[in-house]
Amino acid sequence: MMQLDEGFRLLEIGAYEKAVSYFKGCVRDKTLRPPERALAQLGEVRALISIGRAKPARAILDELEASDARQHPNDMVPSILHERARLAALTGNREEAINCFRNELVDLVSTMPRYYLRLSHNYAGQAEQFMALNDYEQAGIYLKLARDYAETVESDTALRAILSLESLYIEQQGDIKEALTRSMEARRLFIKAGRKSDVKREEMRIASLTKQITALEQDEAQDAN
């Protein structure tokens, strides 16, 4: 498993291209046991989806689902469903993504490692899809659930993504200053994790939100005069 740890470390810091290459090498390693090979394939899928490469990600997921389940780790099914959801979201099929996330919930059981963290990621994923569908009522419900579970396990990994989503959600509700606060906190956690691409994205949002706030304050000042 130490061999796979480096690949998952690369995923954690957002080095997705390097993670793809690393996991590919793991999959080719003939000494890797079948469950470890399945985990390497899953890691490769996560990295591929994160850089927008839907076709190879789908091919690996198809292979994983077609292979003998006895060669998989016990919690592989919900993990595959989670990546199916992310893949559907990547290709713009929001309804399918929500359906896959909900199927993942059915397969998750409380005895699984990092169960609350899994729930947090699932609910955040659903919130993101509902926002893309402009269903902000449902998005708000799932964002709250995602945050509750992230705070239960005190996970920066989950919280930084939730803060970023909350910033988008709150902006739509019209509270630009609070949206800026959430985005700045997300940026802080992304910096802490060394996730450079996410830091850059949040900095672009911070600049946009700051510009909006400045414009609003100027309008208010003119109205007062």
Image: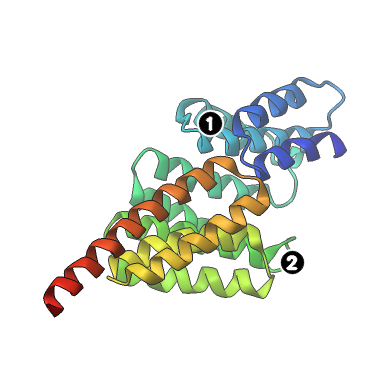
What amino acid type is highlighted by mark number 1? Ala
Left or right of 97? Residue 149 is: right
Q: Nearer the viewer, residue 53 or 211?
A: 211
| Residue 204 versus residue 165 in the image, above or below | above
Percent x, y for residue 198?
53, 46
Percent x, y for residue 73?
75, 46
Question: For residue 27, what is the image quadrant?
Answer: top right
Question: For residue 224, what is the image quadrant?
Answer: bottom left
Q: Quadrant of the N terminus?
A: top right
Instruction: Say whether disc 2 or disc 1 marks the residue closer to the N-terminus.
Output: 1
Q: Nearer the viewer, residue 195 or 132?
A: 195
Percent x, y for residue 40?
71, 34
Percent x, y for residue 185?
54, 63
Question: In the image as oriented, which residue stretches furthest toward the front?
Answer: 225
Q: Quadrant of the C terminus?
A: bottom left
Question: Residue drawn 44% across and 60% down?
Answer: 165
Question: Residue drawn 46% across and 67% down?
Answer: 181
Q: Which residue is mark 2?
A: 111
Name the element at disc 1: helix
Q: Find out whether the residues at labels 2 and 1 contact each other: C-beta distance under 8 Å.
A: no
Label for residue 57?
A: 1
Q: CA distance from mark 2 to mark 1?
A: 28 Å
Mark in front: 2 vs 1: 1
| Residue 50 versus residue 28 in the image, above or below | below
